[in-house]
Image (spheres, rainbow, N blue to C red):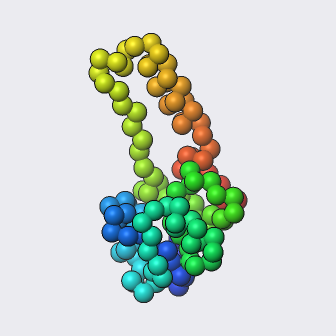
Amino acid sequence: MGELSAHRLIGATQSFQRLPVFAWLAKQVPDDAIVVRAADLDTMAALAREGVGLALLPSDQHLPDLQRLFPVEPRFTGELWLLTHPDLRHVARIKAFMEFLAERLRNDPRLADSSPIP
């Protein structure tokens, strides 16, 4: 990701610091490289659109008016769990929906860890 501290960065408020990418960012750059902090991804994206700084956004957001600068690093990818009550997981309609959703998520290019930089 190059020398991030040479850029103006949009950071996260304390509530986001538990996410690996923002915990990593806090260790990589000095506080003065963070020009503003936001409490949600929509605000981070809006600030980036306005040219305030660079934002670390998940690739599933697919924001055509923003340009990805770095590939997604595997250590920053998250997990999504599909859960149901144990008594319901074998119900045909529930099982069919869970399988459908899992397949759709597995094949969604926006969620691919190595999706190309446009």
From the viewer's perspective, is residue 104 above or below residue 57?
Answer: above
What residue appears at the point 62 percent right and 77 percent down from the top-left corner?
51
Residue 79: name its quadrant: top left
Q: Of all residues shown, which one is farthest toward the top?
A: 92
Residue 66: name its quadrant: bottom right
Residue 59 pos. (x, y %): 56, 54
Q: How many numbered marks have been drawn onto this rendered protein structure?
A: 0
From the viewer's perspective, is residue 82 above or below residue 86?
Answer: below
Residue 84 pos. (x, y %): 35, 27
Q: Can I make out residue 57 in this image?
A: no
From the viewer's perspective, is residue 46 above or below residue 106?
Answer: below
Residue 38 pos. (x, y %): 45, 70
Residue 11 pos. (x, y %): 44, 73
Classify residue 31 as left or right of residue 53. left
Q: Can I make out residue 87 in this image?
A: yes
What residue appears at the point 29 percent right and 17 percent down from the top-left corner?
87
| Nearest to the observer: residue 113 or residue 103 | 103
Classify residue 45 as left or right of residue 25. right
What residue appears at the point 56 percent right and 77 percent down from the top-left corner?
53
From the viewer's perspective, is residue 112 above or below residue 107?
Answer: below
What residue appears at the point 38 percent right and 70 percent down from the top-left corner?
13
| Nearest to the observer: residue 60 or residue 4 | 60
Q: From the image, which quarter does the C terminus lie in?
A: bottom right
